[in-house]
Amino acid sequence: MKELLKLYGELLPVMAFIPIGYWVKKKFNVQAKYISAPLIKVLLPLVVFFNVLDAEAQKLYILPVITFILALSMNPVANFAHKKFAQDMEPLLLRSSFSFFNIAFFGIPTVTALFGEKDVSNLICIYLGSALYGDTIGYFQVAKTKLSKSEAIKKVLQIPFLYVFVAAMICKVLEVETPEFMKAPIKVISFCVSSAGMLIVGLQLADVDFKELEGKLYAKLFALRTVAAAVIVGALILAEYLILNQLEDKDYKMLALVPLFPVAANVTVFASFLKTGESQSVLLVFLSTILSLVLVSLAVLFLF
């Protein structure tokens, strides 16, 4: 019960920004791009960069690989869903919804509550694999629907995260450490990152017509996504344990939580780019966020 109270103490203040975003959009018609631009281009890269510096080297080489494989492996699952019961959904949007897990915005407060602030760096290692997939293969797949292959590649190369990742890895190899004066600001920035992510969900939710909500469809999608991701992560954890055995118990627990995390908010950006399924994408993000609060709460009772 103590762990649950800590979890809610971290998550609920962040999730409160969803209704705040909804109200702000309805009242002042603020566009999500004004929040997403500084979030993606400045705040999140800062959190990633400095947490990579604090991460243990062997975990930095293992955890991102696991989540990259997870994201890639979810594509066939999404294709199966599209073929069997989600024929009306845009296939690329469906793949993104299955492959992109909200590890940063939802995961940071979750890990802070359950493991402590010092282990956020391990979560960022887990996030790196998912982000690398999303900002390379995932983004390229979407971009090439409207652009030539060469233009799509140019778009991928313009993503700030890729350069932050390379810079962080170089600094890690050179054994650069986070300056002491940056540690307190990074904690504040981490909260801002999570809060801004939820605020964007609220802003986008204000444009959704809830009459479009197809309960049975979303239930099937979330059930398949969660179970498939749990099976894949379980297999990857077992493989790492039998072959490398370099991770700690807390790392396995963090990885076990990933399938329970919601659909990443950048899926709505892709939907906007594709000019299709925009309401569906926002509902996927919002409903999966609420579902994740329930699933993570249940997981806490079993894992802690």
Image (tube, rainbow, N blue to C red):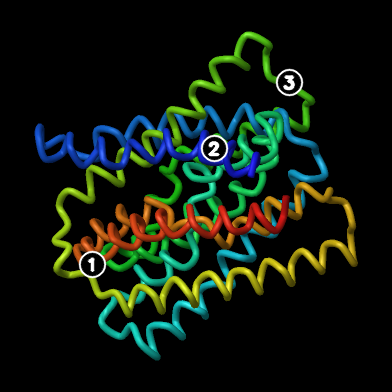
Location of mark 1 (residue) = 277
Residue at position x 68%, y 55% from top?
Answer: 255
For the residues labelled 2 and 1, the Cα–Cα distance comes to 29 Å
Q: Which of 276 and 260 is in front in this view?
A: 260
Dot 1 falls on a residue whose secondary structure is loop
Could you tell me if residue 105 is visible in this image?
yes
Circle 2/circle 1 CB separation < 8 Å:
no
Residue at horizontal 61%, vertical 65%?
70
Pinpoint residue 266: horizontal percent, then vertical percent. Answer: 37, 51
x%, y% of residue 86? 33, 83
Which quarter of the picture shows residue 263? bottom left
**Mark 2 or mark 1: which comes first in sequence?**
2
Pick the quarter of the image with the N terminus. top right
Q: How far apart are marks 2 and 3 (CA)?
A: 23 Å
Where residue 25 sits in the image (x, y, percent)?
A: 15, 39
Identity, as a three-letter code, of the amino acid under mark 1: Gly
User: Are circles 3 and 1 on residues that touch, CB within 8 Å?
Assistant: no
Q: What element carries label 3?
A: loop
User: Closer to the N terminus: mark 3 or mark 1?
Assistant: 3
Front-most of 212 and 293? 293
Task: Say which of 248 and 1 sits in front.
Answer: 1
Under mark 3, the amino acid is Glu
Residue type marked 2: Pro
Q: Bin the neighbour count of mark 2 within 10 Å (Cα to Cα): few under 14, some 14-19, many 20 and up.
A: many
Query: Which corner quadrant of the image does residue 282 belong to?
Result: bottom left
Q: Name the residue under label 3.
A: 177
Residue 285 vertical position relative to residue 122 in the rendered view, above or below: below
Numbered disc in front, either 2 or 3: 2
Mark 2, secondary structure of its residue: helix
What residue would you read off at disc 2? Answer: 109
Dot 2 or dot 3, earlier in sequence:
2
